[in-house]
Image (cartoon, rainbow, N blue to C red):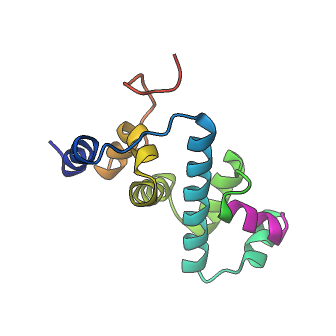
């Protein structure tokens, strides 16, 4: 049994972390974590919001909105941004998972099959049906 799975079970049993129930809450938590990780990545590359905005063809304000989770970044823009910043999708979402684990464990637990695969060093898996999923 993996360490992260043990922690998840411990948290569920001992602290009864309330899992996010509303899809809007889940989307907001994900957008905020993705934005925070984009900002960390941009700053680690010593880029200003203005420079990244110019490279992406958007305004500096739009970069700020992405980084604060106010606006959700499109998939194609995210992929292009990660390419510009020189990181893989897997590495980026591993950082997003660690952010969620720390700041929003309920959402982390909702997506634990996805995130546990990343933590084990696997590529991003396809979603399959699992307890607590939102579709079907």
Predominant SS of the magenta segment: helix
Q: Residue at x 43, y 39 (%)?
A: 19
Q: Residue at x 43, y 53 (%)?
A: 97
Looking at the image, the residue that sits furthest to the bottom is 46
Give, as a single range, the part of the protein colored magenta: 58-66
Q: Is residue 133 above or below residue 40?
A: above
Give the side of residue 102 with respect to residue 5, left or right: right
Q: Residue at x 73, y 75 (%)?
A: 49
Res 12 quadrant in image:
top left
Verify whether residue 96 appears in magenta.
Answer: no
- Count of marks, rendered view: 0
Looking at the image, the residue that sits furthest to the top is 136
Q: Position of residue 30 (x, y in %)?
A: 56, 49
Q: Position of residue 76 (x, y in %)?
A: 70, 48
Give the side of residue 136 with respect to residue 8, left or right: right
Verify whether residue 65 appears in magenta.
Answer: yes
Res 69 quadrant in image:
bottom right
């Amino acid at each position: 049994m993996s360490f992260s799975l043990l922690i998840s079970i411990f948290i569920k049993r001992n602290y009864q972390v309330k899992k996010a129930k509303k899809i809007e809450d889940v989307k907001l938590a994900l957008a905020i974590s993705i934005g925070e990780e984009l900002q960390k990545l941009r700053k680690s590359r010593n880029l200003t919001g203005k420079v990244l905005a110019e490279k992406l063809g958007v305004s500096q304000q739009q970069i700020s909105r992405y980084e604060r989770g106010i606006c959700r970044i499109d998939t194609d823009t995210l992929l292009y941004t990660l390419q510009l910043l020189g990181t893989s999708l897997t590495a980026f979402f591993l950082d997003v998972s660690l952010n969620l684990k720390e700041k929003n464990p309920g959402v982390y637990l909702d997506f634990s099959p996805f995130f546990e695969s990343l933590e084990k060093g696997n590529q991003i898996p396809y979603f399959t049906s699992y307890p607590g999923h939102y579709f079907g």
